[in-house]
Structure formats: C-alpha cells, structure tokens
Amino acid sequence: MYLQFYEVDVPIHTDDRALHGVHVFTGQASSVTEALARAHQAYDAAFAARQAGLEIPGPQDGGWGASGVRDGWELDWAAAKAGPWSNPNSWTRKKLYEL
C-alpha cells in the first residue's frame, strides 16, 4: 500500500490571544483522516513525555513526531486542516526567481 506524505496544520494559541500561530506536522498516511489521527497521536505522546519530565520522542512510524511542544500553548484540533504535503524545496517545483 502506497502511503502519501501529508501536512497537518493545527492552530495554536495561549491565554494571551496576541500569541498565536500554527503547529505543523508531517508524515506518511493513507488518508487525510489517518493523517489527522497520526498527528494528534504524535502530539499527545510528546505532551505526555514533557509533562513527565522525559525527553520528547523523535519521529515515529511514518515520520510523525512533535517538537517544539511548549507549556501554555493550546492546539485547536477541531480547526486542524490536513492535505498532501508539498515540499517547498523540491526540485520539481517551479522556481519563482532566477539566480
């Protein structure tokens, strides 16, 4: 079974609404639904490790992982968006400038 690389973008915020952004996850999955689930699992594992004072696990099966987990940041999983990942550094992408 061919697994495609997906990107999952999850809005993040703190109690101070001026601080916000997006946490980006990438990895292999067979569908958008699986990509969302795998990203959530990677985050949950990283958050649990941080809370326990342990090292955040590296990329898991399929490349899913979470780094940059910070206390006080809330991820809005209900607003998460997923789709096929497009590598911005791929040689197959059209260059927007000439050297």
Image (tube, rainbow, N blue to C red):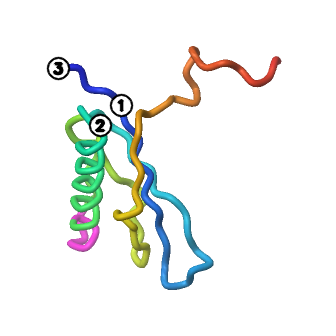
Q: Which residue is mark 2?
A: 63
Residue 5 falls within the magenta-colored stretch: no
Q: Which amino acid is tagged 1?
A: Phe
30 over 92 or under it: above or below:
below
Q: In terms of secondary structure, where does tag 3 sit?
A: loop
Residue 99, x across and y down, in percent:
82, 18
Specify whether 48 is left or right of 21. Answer: left
Q: Is label 3 in contact with label 2 (beta carbons under 8 Å)?
A: no
Q: Which residue is mark 3?
A: 1
| The magenta segment | 49-54
Which is more N-terminal, label 2 or label 1?
1
How far apart are the alpha carbons under marks 3 and 2?
16 Å
Q: Is label 1 in contact with label 2 (beta carbons under 8 Å)?
A: yes
Residue 35, x across and y down, in percent:
29, 43
Q: Which residue is mark 1?
A: 5
Residue 17, x across and y down, in percent:
57, 80
69 over 88 or under it: above or below:
below
Q: Residue furthest left?
A: 1
Q: Which amino acid is tagged 2?
A: Gly
Crowd class of label 1 (few under 14; some 14 to 19; many from 20; radius 10 Å): some
Give the mark toward the camera: 3 or 2.
3
